[in-house]
Every structure is written in structure tokens, then in C-alpha cells.
């Protein structure tokens, strides 16, 4: 039986590209997308969002912020709020990306507050969870996923919202060229889906897209996506090249 979930692919540009490069990228990327393909969302840097908003006539690509502050406004130098993201056309936002958790010391409580803020402003959070190499080596992967999911999804459930996606991103695979094997990814995704059933209910668990992220590239995407609980990818490095990103998107089918 094929999955009831439409594939979803995100491109996390991190702190890359300029406005001129964004425009050139989109001019190649958008016309090559197939209308019956996966849902696609780009996460450009904040300064690129207005340029990325001009995506083309058909709105075939959504855009999202890479982070948001839990407060809607205030004295928070360098931060961006949910209403500001909505103002420049975002419909998604990343919450709890490991580079935020580790570079900026974001705790599970802060990630939960960001998820609640995102949903309050009508943004769909893409909630990122994943274990470090040390946690995997210490056999603590499931414990970490359990803790991160309960905190972040609990915030959405508490707000009465079922609009979110999950991204399983083992930290040891992000930007390292090391990819989880399809079996490692499937085991983690299966675990997350079972946990979702407990936290958010069986129906939501079956409908929620769980993406894999961590050194996905055109050579490994097809094998990974063949796993039943993988519903797409969150792609960092390879999403900076429109041709590579398109190949990954096509591997996800429709
Ligand atoms: C990411 O930043 O979410 C990511 C998965 O990066 P990469 O694809 O470069 O490992």
C-alpha cells in the first residue's frame, strides 16, 4: 500500500547565498518543478526572504524562516519574530535545528516556546530532532528523540494545533558526508511515529510527514526514500545547487 502522506522536501540554505544568487537560483529551480511532485519549501536566510517570495507565478514553492523568537515583538536584538516572517511571505519555520540547539544553546523548553509561537502566528513548524554522535555511541538515541519530541510536539498539542512536520536529523550526519543507512533512518522514523501516536494520537501520527536530514544527496536519496516511514527530506548542502536539489526532489516521487 502506498503512503497516504504527500512527500515534503525542505531546502535549508543556512547562512549561504546573496539576493542576486537567490534570484538566479529560483530562475533555474522553479520552472523545473513538476506540479504533481512533492511539496517543496525553501528556508533561505532572513535577508533573502523578500527575494525568495518572488518565486514565480504559480507559488509552487513555499518559503520558511530558519528560526523565530518566541515573542511577537520587543527588545531582542538580532532576532526575528513570527509576525515578521509572515509579513515577508513565510508559511513555515524551522524549530530546533541542531545548529540552533548547539550554536545558540537552545533548550527543549525554548524550542517548545518557539513551536507554540509559530503556531500562534499561523506558521507551520518543521520540528527538528536528532542525537549527537556521542549520544548514539552511548545508546541514548531513543531517549534523546523521546525527550525532544515530547517537548516540541507537546507544545503544538497543547496549543490545539496539528499542523507541523518532523525532521529526524542525526547530528552526526549533518554536513559531515556521513548519512544514516536506510535502516537506521527507518528505525528512528518508526520510533518517532509510534511516539507521535502516544503524544498526538494515532490519526495524527499516520498523517504527519517525518523527513530525514543529514547529508542527503542525489546518490543516496532513492535508497533512503524507499523506507516506509520516510516522507521526504530536509536538505542542507545539496539544496544550494538547484540541479542536485531537483534530483533529490524527483527521487521522492509525488
Ligand atoms: C540540515 O542543515 O538540515 C542538513 C540536513 O544539512 P546537510 O544536508 O548539509 O547535512
Image (tube, rainbow, N blue to C red):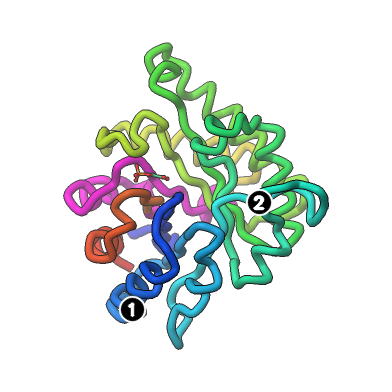
On residue 121, which mark appears? Answer: none
Residue 84 magenta-highlighted? no
Q: Position of residue 47 (x, y in %)?
A: 54, 62
Give the position of the C terminus as an image quadrant.
bottom left
Horizontal side of 102 relative to 160 (left or right) equals left
Residue sitting nearer the eye, 15 or 205: 15
Question: Within 8 Å: ligand 1 and the Cβ of disc 2?
Answer: no
- On screen, residue 206 above or below 60: above
**SS type, badge 2:** loop
Quarter of the picture holding the N terminus: bottom left
Q: Farthest residue in the left direction?
A: 219
Classify residue 26 as left or right of residue 197: left
Residue 27 in picture, x, y percent from top left: 33, 78
Seen at 70% across and 58% down, the residue is: 82
Res 58 quadrant in image? bottom left
Report the image quarter containing ligand 1. top left
Total number of numbered discs in the rendering: 2
Q: Residues within 10 Å of mark 2 (few under 14, many from 20)?
A: many
Q: Point out the tag, 2 or 1, that comes first from the N-terminus.
A: 1
Q: Which residues are magenta?
A: 203-232
Which x, y percent locates residue 100? 55, 38
Q: Please, what secondary structure does the residue beneath circle 1 have? A: helix
Judging by the rendered image, the residue that carries numbered circle 1 is 27
Q: Tags 2 and 1 in contact by the CB under 8 Å rule?
A: no
Please give the name of the residue rendered at 30% of the width and 34% of the height, measured from the top-left corner: 176
At horizontal 28% and vertical 65% (from top left) the residue drawn is: 242
Q: Residue furthest right?
A: 74
Q: Which percent across, then down, holds residue 59?
A: 48, 80
Amino acid at each position: 500500500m502506498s503512503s497516504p502522506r504527500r512527500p515534503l522536501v525542505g531546502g535549508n540554505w543556512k547562512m549561504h547565498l546573496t539576493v542576486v544568487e537567490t534570484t538566479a537560483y529560483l530562475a533555474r529551480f522553479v520552472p523545473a518543478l513538476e506540479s504533481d511532485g512533492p511539496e517543496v519549501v525553501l528556508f533561505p536566510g532572513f535577508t533573502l526572504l523578500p527575494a525568495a517570495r518572488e518565486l514565480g507565478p504559480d507559488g509552487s514553492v513555499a518559503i520558511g524562516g530558519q528560526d523565530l523568537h518566541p515573542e511577537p515583538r520587543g527588545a531582542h536584538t538580532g532576532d526575528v519574530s513570527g509576525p515578521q516572517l509572515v509579513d515577508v511571505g513565510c508559511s513555515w519555520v524551522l524549530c530546533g535545528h541542531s545548529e540552533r540547539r548547539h550554536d545558540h544553546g537552545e533548550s527543549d523548553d525554548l524550542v517548545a516556546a518557539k513551536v507554540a509561537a509559530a503556531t500562534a502566528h499561523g506558521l507551520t513548524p518543521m520540528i527538528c530532532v536528532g542525537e549527537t554522535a556521542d549520544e548514539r555511541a552511548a545508546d541514548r538515541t531513543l531517549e534523546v528523540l523521546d525527550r525532544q519530541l515530547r517537548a516540541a510536539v507537546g507544545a503544538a498539542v497543547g496549543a490545539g494545533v496539528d499542523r507541523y512536520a518532523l525532521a529526524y536529523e542525526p547530528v552526526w550526519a549533518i554536513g559531515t558526508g556521513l548519512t544514516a543507512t536506510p535502516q537506521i533512518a527507518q528505525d528512528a522514523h518508526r520510533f518517532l511515529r509510534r511516539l507521535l501516536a502516544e503524544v498526538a494520537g494515532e490519526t495524527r501520527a499516520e498523517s504527519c510527514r517525518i523527513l530525514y536530514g543529514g547529508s542527503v544527496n542525489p546518490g543516496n536519496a532513492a535508497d533512503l526514500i524507499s523506507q516506509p516511514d520516510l516522507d521526504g527530506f530536509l536538505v542542507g548542502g545539496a539544496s544550494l545547487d538547484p540541479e542536485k536539489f531537483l534530483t533529490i526532489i524527483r527521487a521522492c516521487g509525488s
